[in-house]
Image (cartoon, coloured by chain):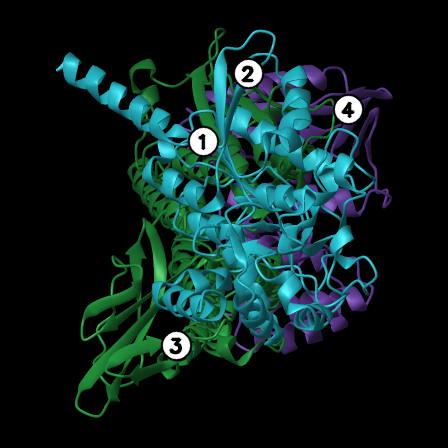
Amino acid sequence: MTDTAFNTVQASGSLRKRLMITLIGGTAILALILFFIVRGYAAQIAQNGQDSILEASVSSILDAAILRDGSVEIDFPYASLSMLDTLEDDRVFYAIYQDDELLSGYATLPRPQSVTDRAAFETLVFQETPVRLASASRVLIGASERTEISVVVGQTQDALSGTLNSISRNVAAFGAGFFALVSLLSFWATATTINPLQRLANAVKRRGPQDLRPFDKAVPVEMVPLVSSLNTLMGRLDQSLTQSEDFIAEAAHRVRTPLATVRSYAETTLVRVTKSENRAALRSMIRAIDESSRAAGQLLDHAMITFRADHLDRQKIELVALVQELVTRLEPIAQMKDVELQLTAPLPVEISGDPILIQNAVRNIIDNALKYSPSDAVIIITVDAQDRPKIQVCDQGPGFPPDEIATLTNRFARGNNAKDIVGSGLGLTIAKDVVAAHDGTLEIFNHDKGGACAVLSF
Amino acid sequence: MKYLLVEDNHELANAISSRLQIDGHVIDHADKILDAIAFSDTFEYDLVLLDIMLPDGDGRTFLKHHRDAQKDTPIIVLTARSQVSDRISMLDLGADDYVTKPFDHAELEARCRAVLRRKSGTAQTLLHFGDVTFDPVAGQLSVKNEIVNLRNRELRLFELLLNARGQIFSKQKLVDRLFSYDEDVSENAIEVYIGRLRKHLENTALTITTLRGLGYRLDHD
Amino acid sequence: MRSFIVLGLMLISFAAQANDWEDRQTFSGATPTKTLRILSSTDTSLFKSIIEGFLVENPDVSVEYLVTGTSDIDNIFRKSPNDFDLVISSAMDLQLKLVNDGFADKIDQINHPQWAQWRHSLFAFTIEPAAIVINKDAFAGYDIPQTRQDLIQALRARPDFFTNKLGTYDVRQSGLGFLFATQDARTSETYWRLMEVMGALDTRLYCCSGEMIDDLVSGKIAVAYNVLSSYANARKEIQDKIEVILPADFPTTMMRTILMSKTSENTVTGTEFIKHLLDIQSNSLAPAESLLPALVSAPSQQTISLEPALLTYLDALKRRNFITEWERAVIQ
């Protein structure tokens, strides 16, 4: 369970983008469909117009056909072809057949096959140009014979395609306008839809890690399940956080109070007995109690620190004041050992972090220094912000065993020179975990003139 | 000194009381907040040792009551809680210091002394012994009107001998009182401190007498 | 293989030579490198100044100007469209059919009024009414007829005088004559009555306007019907002998047109020539360079439109019917 697992949420696409793409893409498709439908419809209407003129032309020619003395005469009117005049001056072709034998007109003009007795229409290529053809036939009945006259009239489609092009341009302009308008609407709709989500996200972001109150602002219906699960989750988290803290506190209390009792008795007894073997026994006892209580304390501290580091409560902290307070608090213990705590801090140093964690880390480092300091020694504590904000604690004790420096900050690792000194081996680990939670480093080394140094950098 | 000890665990209370009595202090013990308030309203105490988890509530209730009553008796909190969680709120509510259970008696004593010194800086009860003057609260020794800088252990040794003038202290007793149990010192170490103290008190009304085989005694001419 | 090609070329040139041209002239620019072949029904004299003006601007061109009748033009051009670059004819129907049948090249860069062009391929450059032209001597002391009806009455009044002294196009030979006849017939029944009257008086039939005017001047005929007024007006020296009458009932008016062959290899020069021609002719104020009537803007009702209906009388059945009827009236 690390911080990064929670902080690097996998992002798969953006809702806003998805919404925009869907809306705009949908619009584009709609606009295209609209374009093709309208264009197709216009083409059909235009074609119908041309067809009806062609049909009129065909029937006016057919109407002029008469049988006179056994021979066919077709004195078709000027209007038969005149009606086919167009703005684009379309070419006109026709052919007149009697029982499939060409009477006049264009011999090579293709003939649409009439299925019914109504006019047939077809678009075919004639003289390398698409030509719309209409054909119809009529049976002439004379005194002794019966003959079928069929007429094909064709017209190129320049005017038709001109009309279609202009319709297409208009429809395309309309489609583009529609698209632009809907795109604008999409922007607006997307913004309106996304805003509540954004507001919720911002509200969550603004909250500190300690703020686990439920969200009570009104949200759109669709977001209610999300927000209510979020609220439930926060409620459970709040409860479990409280329970964890309470548990740790309770555990500490339960362990420490009896230990305190035993220790006090032992110390009282130690003062009263004089026999040296009894005294030695009591001293071992006290030492054992200290070992276990300290171990328990640091384990609990470590648990608390791990717990807090997972949801760091960052605040503005002034490091010098924080260290000064610690020094003041540790002064009595230092005096007891005739050790001097010397704090050098020329300027205030501000960082953002969890004050309780940092205090604990620094306290552990100074505790260590105090433990390993001989009488009449000085512990030099420096706080400065050169390069990075840092706290350096140097003692005049034996220093770290050089070959173990690398492993000392691991859990329960203790220097092999620490056998006589009470400790759990968690002090440096706690300090390291705390600085790591603040993206800082713990550095330990031995001073040139002897003594150990620890530097917490943030 | 008169101490009020507020602690619900009777065993622990007994242990602390008997250890403090060895140092010559008078202890009143209350095992719940109501009693503690009654005690503190009735008597004057030099110091209150307050456990924070009590059967009828939180020690913070007492702290609040105490400060609301404008009492300046220093309070040292005894806490079994983790150092990280409770500390700040207790100091905010007016505790002067705290020790975490289980505590080293020497540390408790040192903290008590420090708190007392901080609190009653003005209450001057100087002790005069001829040309020697001692300020027990500030822990300051003057010889012939000149301040003598005593190291912590020298001071504590002096205080010990001064408070029981004419009484013999064995070396072992002195080691127990001056050193923490885990400081592995021989009884001879005491001789060093006695030597230093003697030097400071040379040609004064106070003399440290060696009683061979028995120990040391401070005499006043 | 090569000998076949040479033989082929010889045959083609022979075929071209073989045509019986009314006139054939070559105009050369200063430094001719290419030849523009124009097939035309318009007399060379009327076109000369236009061609010369063109050659001044385009010295690298020489123009071969071939003149024949409108029906011949149609036949010749349909047979060998490769041999000619431009076709000029007064037979609007034949010209339109050439375009409709895909023989003409589309020239989009020419901006010409819609009514005076068809498919950007056929461009009109004159507006010319058909006229009744009379010998003034023949009508001395008589009213000059102003309409077809007047003419019918004049003929009926002096049948002996007019017998054998009338002239009109032989519509079987002249494309323009056929066009005028069909348009007249389409407009009014008077045409047929006039033809019957003229037929009864043994009307002479001509292939071309030129001959008709010559005979009119010489007094061989007294009345020529459906003569191109432009031809009559063009000959200044005969104006005192004849009178050109635009029929007041309806003057059938045609437009002379030009098209460029689709197979022409001189499209750039051809286009330039058409532009040059249209520029001159579209200038309605008496074109100085041209003897041809200008293309005045507003076409009258009687101006034959450039429309597909012109194909109507070219239809084999229709033509056969019309000729039959015409022969029945005129030849009798």
Q: Horizontal and vertical percent for residue B76?
A: 63, 54
Which residue corresponds to mark 3? A61
Which chain does the residue under circle 2 lie in? C
Q: Are marks 2 and 4 in contact (CB under 8 Å)?
A: no
Q: Colour of chain B?
A: purple
Which residue corresponds to mark 2? C61
- The residue tagged with tag 1: helix, strand or loop? loop
Q: Is disc 4 on the same chain as disc 2?
A: no
Residue at 59% x, 62% y is C163
Left or right of A59 in this view: A185: right
Q: Mark on residue C21?
A: 1
Q: Are marks 3 and 4 in contact (CB under 8 Å)?
A: no
Q: Which chain is cyan?
A: C
Q: Which chain is green?
A: A
Q: CA distance from mark 1 to mark 3?
A: 39 Å
Q: CA distance from mark 3 to mark 4?
A: 158 Å
Examine the rendered structure and indicate whether residue A184 appears above or below residue A112. Answer: above
Q: Horizontal and vertical percent for residue A417?
A: 32, 22
The residue mark sitting in front, 1 or 3, is: 1
Upstream in sequence: badge 2 or badge 1: 1
Query: Which sits in the foreground, C182 or A329?
Result: C182
Look at label 2 and name its amino acid: Val
Q: Horizontal and vertical percent for residue A194?
A: 56, 64
Q: Assess disc 3: are there few (<14), some (14-19) or many (≥20) residues with their C-alpha within 10 Å of its C-alpha.
A: many
Q: Mark on residue B205?
A: 4
Q: CA distance from mark 4 to mark 1?
A: 168 Å
Q: CA distance from mark 2 to mark 1?
A: 22 Å
Examine the rendered structure and indicate whether residue C235 appears above or below residue C205. Answer: above
Query: Which sits in the foreground, A407 or A262?
Result: A407
Q: Are marks 2 and 1 in contact (CB under 8 Å)?
A: no
